Amino acid sequence: MNKVELRDRFFNRYKGLIRTEMIPYQWKVLNDEIDITIERERNDDSIPNEKSHVIENFRIAAGRKKGNHYGWVFQDSDLYKWLEAAAYTLREKMDEELKCLADDVVDLISEAQEENGYLDTYFTIEEPDQKYKRLWESHELYCAGHFIEAAVAYYEAVGNQKVLKTACKLADHIDSVFGDEDGKIHGYDGHEEVEIGLMRLYRLTQNERYLKLARYFLFVRGTDCDAMNSKHLPLAYYQAHLPVLEQDTAEGHAVRLVYLCTAMADAACETGDEKLLSACRRLWKSIVNRRMYITGGIGSTVSGEAFTLDYDLPNDTMYCETCASVGLVFFAYRMLMTEEKGEYGDVMERVLYNTVLGGVALDGKHFFYVNPLEVVPGKSSKDPLKSHVKCVRPQWLGCACCPPNLARLLASVEQYVFVQKKNKLFVNLFVECKGSFEIEDGILEIELKTGYPWDGCVEIKLNYSGTASVCLGIRVPSWSDTFDAEINHESTAFETKDGFIYINQVFKEDTIHLKLDMGAKRWYAHPMVENDLGKFAVTRGPFVYCLEEADNGKNLHLLSVEKQEPFEYEFEETLLGGVGIITASGWKAEADQEEEGLYRKSDSAVKKVKTKIKWIPYYSWANRGENEMRVWVREDNLC
Amino acid sequence: MNKVELRDRFFNRYKGLIRTEMIPYQWKVLNDEIDITIERERNDDSIPNEKSHVIENFRIAAGRKKGNHYGWVFQDSDLYKWLEAAAYTLREKMDEELKCLADDVVDLISEAQEENGYLDTYFTIEEPDQKYKRLWESHELYCAGHFIEAAVAYYEAVGNQKVLKTACKLADHIDSVFGDEDGKIHGYDGHEEVEIGLMRLYRLTQNERYLKLARYFLFVRGTDCDAMNSKHLPLAYYQAHLPVLEQDTAEGHAVRLVYLCTAMADAACETGDEKLLSACRRLWKSIVNRRMYITGGIGSTVSGEAFTLDYDLPNDTMYCETCASVGLVFFAYRMLMTEEKGEYGDVMERVLYNTVLGGVALDGKHFFYVNPLEVVPGKSSKDPLKSHVKCVRPQWLGCACCPPNLARLLASVEQYVFVQKKNKLFVNLFVECKGSFEIEDGILEIELKTGYPWDGCVEIKLNYSGTASVCLGIRVPSWSDTFDAEINHESTAFETKDGFIYINQVFKEDTIHLKLDMGAKRWYAHPMVENDLGKFAVTRGPFVYCLEEADNGKNLHLLSVEKQEPFEYEFEETLLGGVGIITASGWKAEADQEEEGLYRKSDSAVKKVKTKIKWIPYYSWANRGENEMRVWVREDNLC
């Protein structure tokens, strides 16, 4: 059994928060045991939530209690994601109390499951005759997918047989209802996810029916069938405007699109389907080359939480949902499994260290749904077009998809470090960990030691018990202009290709040292990104940086930096839990010039003063109360 | 009787269009006699209109026909504004056919009026027991105000007694229902307008009750009374959050705010109420110094069609409703009547020549509701946050307030040229016209000859039959860096104050020549206007200029101009009905650089090519099909 153990200081802090804060806290929320402020993510009277009621819905569906369903129709998935996060936490370190809770949850879920395998508390309780009749909005298969993912994770973590049995019963039920065959429903869920669950269940059980069913759902999408008989939203919102093989651009609801892509890449990886892989590549390019923020955020508009069009990346009205970033990590990792290209790891790292981590407060108890690149508190409160953009992370969200999604990703972050393909092993992320992999006739033990993400030195210790030649690929991030690599303290001309360096040999006890370029860097956007023209962003290592009012005063848009100005870097142990900060000398235009009028004939009157500008990593913003923030900073060209 | 006759080539083209196109066309629309495409101003299913039905509503209310009311609750005002425009057109030049139509309209309206004076087709037909019970949304007094305005105008134009009688009957009825007294309704309309109508009726009739009633409606606003018992919208939307004397900033629905201000200035002017005048000055400053676009547009957000906050002036999501600009002209003119400050005329001119004229196509048959400063057609169609921003003027609008509002302003544009105050006469606009004014013991005939707005030479011929000293004030626009002025071909050291030059003498036959600085000018926004930072706008004379794709190709945001680059001006007789165009040498960044990635480490790779850039006057945009447009252009600082 391949296994990876995380030993990373940076991520273990988050794992600790998940174990001690997020999982217990979310448990209480799901049980309505905690007095929380549920923030509505929009000023929308149609949003019902004032408590969670998730566990209560299961109790009612299970017949343990009487009552009505309350909350969103897709809310069951909150519990499933919680279970999945708990599974990863237990896999890492057993905790009998948590296992007890999770086992009880499994019992409850299996009791809520109907005789024939159907599982969805809303329809079981409220509208049993409407099952599978409103696929575009019912989220029944979406929830099923989340349960199956959680079940696989929990089974793998603690060997609970009931959860696997319940998941298979559900999958078998779905398989009996949906499909090409006459008499079955020809349709698919408006929100992709079941396909991911089925692929995981297939990988665990090797039951071909689950692969076939996942492929059915993928390929029926966008064809003329009885799924989308709603005219409420454009078909592209559900990625239902075209068959997936004909989709060239990332369209519609961003979370849905990346979940679809994840499942497509999964299936392409398992089946070697070249057409499907080509579609994945095209959608990847559409996202990454034309529709992704520098933070890794996706979804340019709140309306439909959706992609808009190429290079349309407004920094203050966008959506950039945390869940969409979580999904993009999934997609990137599946592409890494499919193709040996460092680019996928580059994006995975960008998303993980910036929008994903930015989705949770340093205390592990407050969460962003929307991840802006520019915030002015007054505008969010006054301009209804920006009312979805919060300036501080709320405690819990009316639509609570993001917090447990984040938790399940961060609780399993070590899964994303390596990819093994037969005798090849790829290192994608630089986190301290120890892994062991069965490769050919031996076990390869691999240990990463590093001060990453703040320091760029990575030591990789290898110990191989076999006699076969193993190909080790190590990603060199594209942001690293230069790198040094040594094996056993000797420089070698490593083979490099597509963002990886390769060492192909019979390993014994070997040590590789990699040193990345950790200079702070300026980035410019493609000139078609109008909002970023004339501006730059700063990164260092995997982190995108931003300015906050707490460090730089109000009116961040008045700041500018000359093109040649150098950056300084310093690690501040006491700031924001310890962050590396970047400073540079810049200018601040004076704002108090009303007497010169709103419009004036010469800008020579714009006085500016020299000022020191300070950047913090984007993930750490909004941890010091409500204040302005911005990622893109104006660049001065001096005359 | 003071009288002004327009002889201006530029505005007479519009007057001709109103007479030959807009009035007949709108008449057919109001009568459902024309097959039109009614554009919805938003993607909002709640908007009912698929035909106008305005006249039909009156026929039903008058008992001539059976049926139901159809359309917006405030739609009666469409007909009133049409009648007002027709009145101005008839005042200028009698047209028996049009007068017949208008007389018939008056008959119809008076038949639709109830016995007690009540007039509103919706409530008469549909909900007679709900009269005045939903003041925040019913628009009953708003419509009344428009009728009274139209009635005064029509009476003054053709002497129709019935229209005046109907208006007085309506005003008397309102006076009997609303007021401080016990037993009366203590309230006011959610949409200001009746106050303006009452002030006009007071000026015509000198009946103090109308002034008192107008003042009642002004001062009861924002006090605790039974008007605003709705919680649907924030009180500031209706300017009902504070008593008007305590309002310091322009808040809420922009049209409502400027209508309120117009009435406040009217009342302040008539009564010399200093507190009211101070409030007008504060609101004026709030608009003009902090919340107005360079085009004179107001209303920064579609949501509530409202003001947002100081210096928040996004160029592509704003509202800038045509009606709001029409209202701002009204407010500015009332302030000119109240105070001798050229600034009011400057703003009036800016609004009139840019957003107001921009509201109508050169053919007189297509209209903008929303007047953006930046448009990319793909974004308007793809991003729902910009769906209210049309790229070409629709034929008619689901909510048809703007076209007839524009018509009534342009049909009476000569009214805004002069202000007379006892022995003082002010020239505010430079349009060819001939006016005669009773001043002291004689008649002052004044004739303006000019090639304005393209040429800056103005000849003012005076002929005074009296013996008194007359003070003539001529506005020198603040955009004119220099000016030359002569009287009878002799230079004199004219007294200048607050934007006017003054000539104080006993005029006989005298001629004044004024030469304004018609150089093309660069304007910069206050640095707090984030969206305009690093950009400039071009004006020449009263016109703000813009770039269009038709002249400059796609991706206008890629264009930039160096700071010192000179402008060239040329009049193009065959372009857009004859416009002065401005050109300069600039740069265009190359957009086709996908291989370099969405984010890149150096911007030295941004190739740009020299290009000639061409500006057209803003009012003339969108007359060559759907294409990009932008007002603010990036300024290059060369290194």
Image (cartoon, coloured by chain):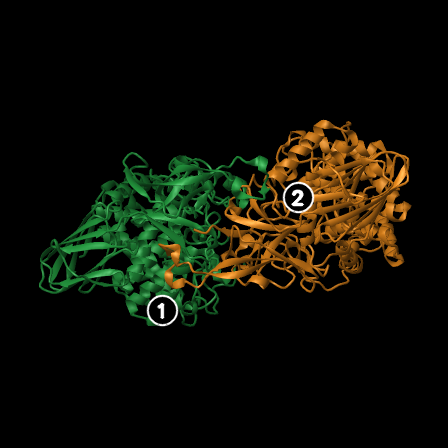
Chain colours: A green, B orange
Q: Position of residue A639 (x, y in %)?
A: 45, 47
User: Depth check: B106 or B251 in front?
Assistant: B251
Residue A114, visible in the rendered structure:
no
Please, what is the three-letter code of the amino acid marked with disc 1?
Ser
Residue B308 numbered mark, or none: none
Q: Quadrant of residue A614?
A: top left
Q: Is residue A446 visible?
A: yes
In front here: A555 or B238? A555
Label placed on residue A278: 1
Looking at the picture, how far across and down is residue A208, in whole percent? 29, 67
Coordinates of residue B301 in the picture (x, y in percent): 58, 46
- The residue lying at 37 percent from left, 52 percent from top is A523
Query: In the picture provided, is B322 more to the left or to the right than B156?
Result: left
Q: Is residue B302 above or below residue A492?
A: above
Q: Secondary structure at mark 2?
A: loop
Compared to A82, does A418 lie above or below? below
SS class of the residue under badge 1? helix
Q: Which quadrant of the rendered structure holds the N terminus of chain B? A: top right
- Tell which subunit mark 2 falls on: B
Residue B417: image location, x then y, percent: 77, 45
Q: Is residue B520 left or right of residue A556?
A: right
Residue density around tag 2, few if under 14, some if 14–19, many if 20 or more, within 10 Å: few
- Chain ID of residue with mark 1: A
Side of B496 where B552 appears, left or right: left
Q: Which residue is mark 2?
A: B482
Q: Does mark 2 fall on the same chain as mark 1?
A: no
The CA distance from mark 1 to mark 2 is: 66 Å
Q: Is residue A279 left or right of residue B195?
A: left
Given residues A284 and B575, the one toward you in this image is: B575
In this view, the residue farthest toward the front is B490
User: Answer yes or no: do the residues labelled 1 and 2 have beta carbons within 8 Å?
Assistant: no
